[in-house]
Image (cartoon, rainbow, N blue to C red):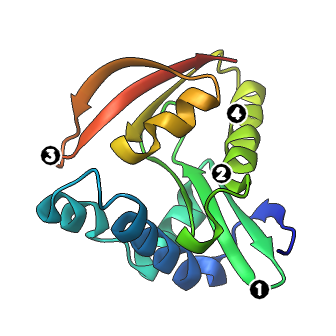
Amino acid sequence: MDSWTLRNARENDAPAIAKIWVESIRTLCAVHYTAEELAARCSGKTPEMVRELILHSAFFIVAESESGILGFCTCSDFQIIRAALYVAPEAAGRGIGRSLLRAWEEAARKHGIRIMRIHSGRNATGFYRKCGYRLEKEITLSNGIRADEMTKEL
């Protein structure tokens, strides 16, 4: 398996990121959501939407290897207004998500955040628990998707 590095996302990464986002939802989330919920979670994940996020997010990084982009993490600001962390299904379980999360947490610390508050998809709750997050409550997002609100002191 090849190694990866983290770097800031670039506009030309948008098609690869959009593809990973949709494939990850369809593959890694399938056990936890209905077909309708999966469709809602995939809706709008286009290269154009990703380009806008890259241009306007407070934080947007990718994990990249020689073979291409393996995952990404973004937030519109450090108060979870819009945040996402996804890894390509074929790259899951290699520590990429944990590396992306650590970089996000470090950036949040630099912005004065002392408690990370995230909305985790049901498929990722176990991952966040392993990374030190605590489940606060189950929530329903504005698009009707079920999620878990989780926190961690930084």
What is the C-alpha distance between the residues marked 3 and 1?
Answer: 36 Å
Question: Which residue type does callout 2 highlight?
Answer: Gly
What is the C-alpha distance between the residues marked 4 and 3?
Answer: 27 Å
Label 3 or label 1, whichever comes before in sequence order: 1
Q: Quadrant of residue 27?
A: bottom left
Q: Quadrant of residue 141?
A: top left
- Observer-side mark, 2 or 4, equals 2
Image mark for residue 105: 4
Q: Position of residue 96 (x, y in %)?
A: 71, 56
- Please tell me which residue lies in front, 25 or 32: 32
Q: Quadrant of residue 22?
A: bottom left
The residue identified by callout 2 is: 97
Question: Which residue type does callout 1 highlight?
Answer: Ser
What is the C-alpha distance between the residues marked 2 and 4?
Answer: 12 Å
SS label for mark 3: loop
Question: Which residue type does callout 3 highlight?
Answer: Gly
Question: Which residue type does callout 4 highlight?
Answer: Glu
- Observer-side mark, 1 or 4, equals 1
The residue identified by callout 3 is: 144
Identity of the residue drawn at 30% across and 68% down = 42
Label 1 or label 4, whichever comes before in sequence order: 1
Identity of the residue drawn at 18% across and 49% down = 143
Callout 1 crowding tier (Cα within 10 Å): few <14, some 14–19, many ≥20: few
SS label for mark 1: loop
Q: Position of residue 113 (x, y in %)?
A: 65, 21
Label 2 or label 4, whichever comes before in sequence order: 2
The residue identified by callout 1 is: 67
SS label for mark 4: helix
Label 2 or label 3, whichever comes before in sequence order: 2
Evaluate if marks 2 and 1 touch, with contact meaning CB atoms under 8 Å apart.
no
